[in-house]
Amino acid sequence: LIEAGDTGSTQQSLIVCIPRGASQEDVDDQIRDLFTDLSGDDYDFDDIYSLEVVELSSKKDAQGALNLAKGSASAGNLDSLPSVAAKLMTSSKAKRGMLETPAITKACHICREVFNAQSRTARAQLTAWKTRVGRDLLVDGFGASAELLRKTCLEKYNKQTRAAAGVPGAAPYRKELKTQLQS
């Protein structure tokens, strides 16, 4: 991953090198998904970065990627991030350490994905119950069923995000999402 500088507009040039055979489209999508997870809807990826995914299969390809980065760096000023990127880097999420390392970013992404899945599960069941009540029908064993749903969702969340608890920058985020899931 090479962040090479200002491209002359308000974008930073972001060059991602991947091994031969890796899907450039998948890598592009994953980077954009991570960015969205970290920034929410506050920023648009394309306003901040000009992304180039470069496949490397030889030393010549690697040298070409370095030359591309050097060209981007010489086209702009490495000392000045665009204002939107500067805001993102000083956001509350960045201060909590979420933008520090790829391990933290990955752990936070996993926590968000698991949180979303468990939230969907709970919402689906709540919607079914709401529909029954809307038709003046009883929900048999509602209390026990609701508690079981809550317990199951939290257990799955804990199990699937356990590794993130050991990542210093991701642990607070994991706990924050767990609190939201409990409510």
Image (tube, helix red, strand yellow):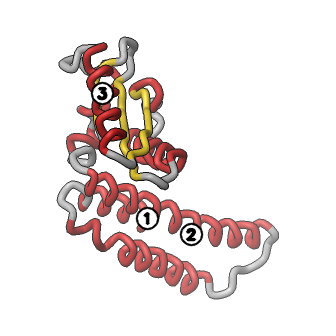
Say which amino acid is labelled 2. Answer: Ala
* Mark sitting on residue 122: 2
Label 2 element class: helix
Q: Residue at x 47, y 36 (%)?
A: 41
Contact flag, marks 2 and 1 (Cβ < 8 Å): yes
Q: Residues within 10 Å of mark 1 (few under 14, many from 20)?
A: some
Residue underneath mark 3: 67
Q: Residue at x 34, y 57 (%)?
A: 106
Quadrant in the rendering for residue 9: top left
* Mark sitting on residue 16: none
Q: Nearer the viewer, residue 152 or 43?
A: 43
Q: Position of residue 56 (x, y in %)?
A: 38, 46
Q: Position of residue 171 (x, y in %)?
A: 24, 61
The answer for how far apart the CA atoms under marks 2 and 1 are is: 9 Å
Residue underneath mark 1: 181
Nearest to viewer (mark 2 / mark 3):
3
